[in-house]
Image (spheres, grey):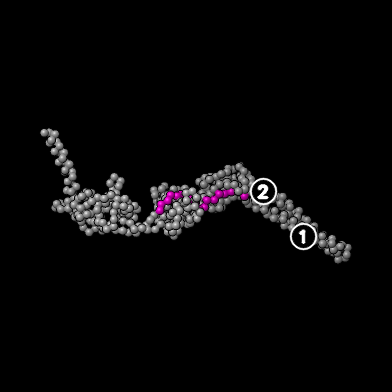
Amino acid sequence: MRNVSRAASLIGFALALIAAPSASAQSSDGSSPALPVTQVMLADVPVTYTVPGSVISDGRIEVSSRVVGFIEQLDVREGQKVSRGDLLVRIDQTDIDEAIQQAQAGVRAADEDLQDAEFDVQKFEGLARSGSVSTETLRKAKVRVDVARATLDGARSTLAAAEAQKDYATITSPVDGVVVSVARRSGEMATAGSTILTVESREVLLFKAFVSEGNLAAIDPNTPVTIRIDALDNAKFTGRIRGIVPSGDDVTRRYEINVILPKDQRLLPGMFGRAEIILGTQKSVLVPAKAIVRRGGLDGVFVVEERTARFRWLRTGQVLGDTVEVVSGLSGGETILAAANDAVRDGSAIRTEAGR
């Protein structure tokens, strides 16, 4: 008898739990409260294509030397900020100075030869008038002047080139930016064309991503692109497409796209993010965000059928302001509770009012 009485008590307790929601859904006068409802509508929803990518600098410059020589001074380091015109590298000028001295000596010698040749011409012209010198001798003297003048011009060009090498021995920053890598150190040999260090300008930052060939034709370069950066708590930035590289990878079939980012001190080259590119629009079901009921990580709504609330699971898509896109589970024209209500359960009888 004791077991029978205990079982009866448990059944009574379970029935009380089942009845509890219905009781809580009623007003103080015993009638069910009127709940707001809304009709499911179809609306144009943007079709968004999301691709991963990285922030890059549009002004990444590899600084190299135009002359050969030992690095005499290199005081900058990785991470150091530099301004346009700041000294970056100084190359030892010993060999350059010797070349300049040799070129200067060549200019002096050529100038002396020219003066000597011009003197001979003047002398032979006087003698030719008196018949003491043949016209052939005078002609050869004039030819010597022309040769000497050409030699002097060549010597001056050699001197100018040597002096220009001296200017190349001092390397300054071409932009305002940050030193991101240093490949050489003071005392090492710098060769013409080899990278000594790299400077990145922060004036223009790009978001670089790769899009599939299937979505390439649908991308409108004039449509703004939303960029979300992981390291900045998924912060959102709006950029514009600068261009799409028209040659794709023959293995991945993807094409490079570059988006110009707004100026923001938080953005740094190398940051990972995602680009949300709008490809067009499509008709989709939208419901109020507050109508969504979340259970166990899944979403659903209460559909009103003949004054009865029926819970229905949904597969949701984009969150668009205060509405949520429904990918599957609802059709346009159905009526749902406009706001989630903890007192309502699947199968609850309800009274409705006009919802917004």
Label 1 amino acid?
A: Asp
Cβ atoms under marks 2 and 1 closer than 8 Å? no
Cα distance between the residues tagged 2 and 1: 30 Å
At which x and y percent is residue 36? Answer: 23, 56
User: Residue 342 appears at what percent x and percent y?
Assistant: 23, 49
Quadrant where the N terminus lies?
top left
Q: Is residue 197 left or right of residue 141?
A: left
Residue 304 sits in quarter:
bottom left
Q: Residue at x 45, y 55 (%)?
A: 216
| Along the viewing direction, whichever of 281 and 25 lies nearer the viewer | 281
- Image check: 27 left or right of 60? left
Name the residue carrying label 2: 96
Q: Which residue is mark 1?
A: 146
Residue 330 occupies quadrant: bottom left
Q: Which residues are magenta?
A: 49-66
| Secondary structure of residue under mark 2 | helix
Q: Is 102 inside the magenta-drawn segment?
A: no
Considering the numbered disc 1 on the image, is that residue within a helix, a strand or a loop? helix
Q: Position of residue 176 (x, y in %)?
A: 52, 52
Mark 2 vs 1, N-terminal side: 2
Residue occupying image coordinates x 32% and y 54%: 325
Q: Residue at x 24, y 50 (%)?
A: 311
Residue 87, can we see it?
Answer: no
Hey, which residue is sitting farthest bottom in the picture? Answer: 129
What amino acid is found at the position of numbered circle 2 in the picture?
Ile
> Furthest residue to the left?
1
Taking depth in this image into account, of 97 and 3 the one nearest to the observer is: 3
Query: Can the viewer see residue 43?
Result: yes
- The mark closer to the camera, 2 or 1, is 1
For this view, does 334 lie left or right of residue 275? left
Which residue in the rendered view is the most extreme toward the top? Answer: 2
